[in-house]
Amino acid sequence: MSRINFDLQELQAFVAVADRLSFRAAAEDLHISPPALSRRIEKLESILGVKLLERSTRHVALTHVGRSFLDHSRTALDELEGAMLGIADMASHRRGTITVACVPSAAYYFLPTVIARFSRHYPHIRVHILDESANTVLNAVTGRQADFGINFIGTQDPDLDFEPIFSERFVLAVRSDHRLAARRKVRWEELCDECFMTVGKSSGNRVLIDSALAKIERRPAGFFEVAHISSLLGMVEAGLGVAAVPRLALPRKKHSTLRAIPLVDPEVSRTLGLLSRKNHPLSPTAKVFYDLIKKEPDRI
């Protein structure tokens, strides 16, 4: 069997592009020029004899082979990193890396506090946060790209354990100068008369809301659809309309522009929980971080 000869930089280049789906962004992450990054990818594809990425001037996507190779590449890099950090250090909580997949609202709302507390005790353990959509978080945990996850879906997955940590209601996000801003509560059917904005149908939040509103006669239809809650809030702040979002998605402290109003008839809520693989104990370092997250909602 012929020897495949490529270096670590080419593998890191491929993973960086796959993560960002942008040569420019990946090049900035690696502190190299886009042409240098392209040469590394081309060399890797030439050595392997397959195309890993489909790319044009505006679009980058993984090929079928590329998606499969990405899993192997991540595993290889993680194992190499673990070996370099030292098994003894990892076991004694002094060094290592933890990867946590979580929905963005959790990453924004309470994870920074947990990370700060964890890092004071374990300053040499790196924490890698994958703040992605609910479905991506679920796949990251089942696919072993993350040690564990924070999500509001996955309770029915037979291969996962779901430990509830926090329940939150959906609220109406409006600008402070909107006619509904002074209201104590708003009924869902009232939003039929508003420019209502929402996340797309592939979003876990959208599925949850659609299911909860399925039985009411009048329910709002989205004028604008976006992929992320953060985009919704930006559009609300710009005065383009109103949006239903999880309470965690809004700032803890009073915001100068945005207001959150409870939505009723019906009340819609979601439960965030910790996702982990069944029969796969967490590493000692991941378990410490997991336990800190479990306690954090009690402080909110």
Image (cartoon, rainbow, N blue to C red):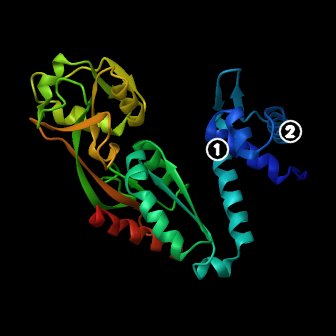
Q: Which is in the foreground here, disc 2 or disc 1?
A: 2
Q: Amino acid at mark 2?
A: Lys
Residue 242 versus residue 37 in the image, above or below: above
Mark 1 lies on residue: 68
Residue 186, image x and y in percent?
12, 32
Q: Residue at x 30, y 62 (%)?
A: 297
**Element at label 1:** helix
In the displayed structure, does residue 280 sit left or right of residue 85? left
For mark 1, does the 10 Å Cα neighbourhood hold few (<14), some (14 to 19), or many (20 or more) residues? few
Q: Nearer the viewer, residue 145 or 111?
A: 111
Q: Residue furthest front?
A: 256
Label placed on residue 50? none
What residue did someone put label 2 on? 43
Residue 277: x and y in percent read 44, 62
The residues bearing labels 2 and 1 have C-alpha atoms spaced at a distance of 18 Å
Query: In this orientation, does residue 199 appear?
Result: no
**Picture layout, residue 95 above or below residue 15:** below
At label 1, the amino acid type is Ser
